[in-house]
Amino acid sequence: MKLQQILFSQGFGTRRACAGLVYAGLVRHAGRELDDPDEDLPTEGLVLNVEGRDWPFHAQALVMLHKPAGYECSQKPKHHPSVLTLLPPPLRQRGVQPIGRLDEDTTGLLLLTEDGRLIHKLTSPKHHVPKVYEVTCKHPLAADAVPRLLAGVVLDDDPAPVAAAACEQVDDTHLRLTLTEGKYHQVKRMIAAVGNRVEALHRSRFGPLVLPADLAPGQWCWIPGWPAE
C-alpha cells in the first residue's frame, strides 16, 4: 500500500495532509526517514513513526481506554467532556466510537472502534458478552442481596426479571457483578431493587479482556486480534 494511503487510512488527515507529513520529514520507518508519499510498504506488522510517535498499522482500530469519572461516552456530550477527547487525533479522525456506554460517573474498561459490525456483535444481547463490574454500595449488603440478584430482580419499568450472570460479595459494601445485557443504568437499578444504592461503579472486564493494572485513568492501548472471526 502506498505510504500516503496508509497514513490516510490511519487517520492522519486528508491525502494532501498526509503527503505533507512525508515531505516535512515527519514520517519514519525502521529508523529511516520516508520522503516519497507514493512509496509502497507492506502493512503486515508495519509500525510507522509519525511526528515522533510510533503508530502501528491497524486495518480496523480497536482500543481499550481506562475511562475516568467525569467523561461522557458520546460524540456530542451535554454536561461533561467526551471520552473521545482522551484519544489522539488520528483515532478521532478515524471515527472510533465507544462499544456500549459507561455513565459519566462510572470508571474502568471501555472499548472503542470504528467497526460498526464489531460494535453490533459486542453489544447485541444475543451474543451474551459478559461484563464485570466492581460495585461499591452505600449501605451494608442485605443477607439476601446476592441470591436475589442471581435469581433476578424486577426493574421499575420492566416486568421481566433481570438476573446477574454471576455475583460475588467481596465485603460488606462491595459486590463483583457480571452482566451479559446492557440495559439503561442496569447495575444501579438492580442494586436499587435489592434496597441499596451504588456509590461507585467500575468496569474491570469486558469478555476475556481485563483492565491492565498499569493502564492509568485516561490512558488507552491497542487491542489487536480480538475478537477472532
Image (cartoon, rainbow, N blue to C red):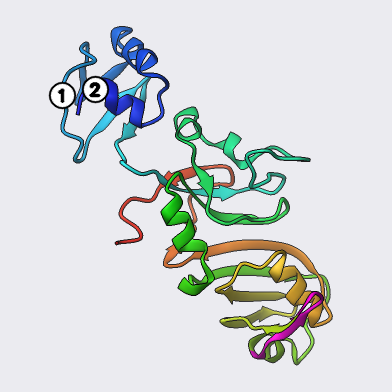
Q: Write the start and end of the magenta stretch as one range.
A: 151-158
Query: Which residue position holds label 2?
Result: 3
User: Quick check: 111 above or below 9?
Assistant: below
Identify the residue at image location x=60%, y=34%: 85
Amino acid bearing label 2: Leu
| Left/right of residue 107 with respect to residue 115 in the rendered view | right
Toward the viewer: 161 or 84? 161
Q: Which secondary structure, mark 2?
A: helix
Magenta-colored stretch includes residue 63: no
Task: Choose the circle earlier in sequence order: 2 or 1.
Answer: 2
Query: Which residue position holds label 1?
Result: 40
Disc 1 crowd rating (10 Å Cα; few below 14, some 14-19, many 20+) is few
Marks 2 and 1 sit apart, C-alpha to C-alpha, by 6 Å
User: Quick check: 160 above or below 1?
Assistant: below
**Mark 2 and 1 residues: CB-CB less than 8 Å, in contact?**
yes
Identify the residue at image location x=49%, y=41%: 96
Q: Do we see residue 166 in this rendering?
A: yes
Q: Do we see residue 54 in this rendering?
A: no
User: Quick check: 180 above or below 26?
Assistant: below
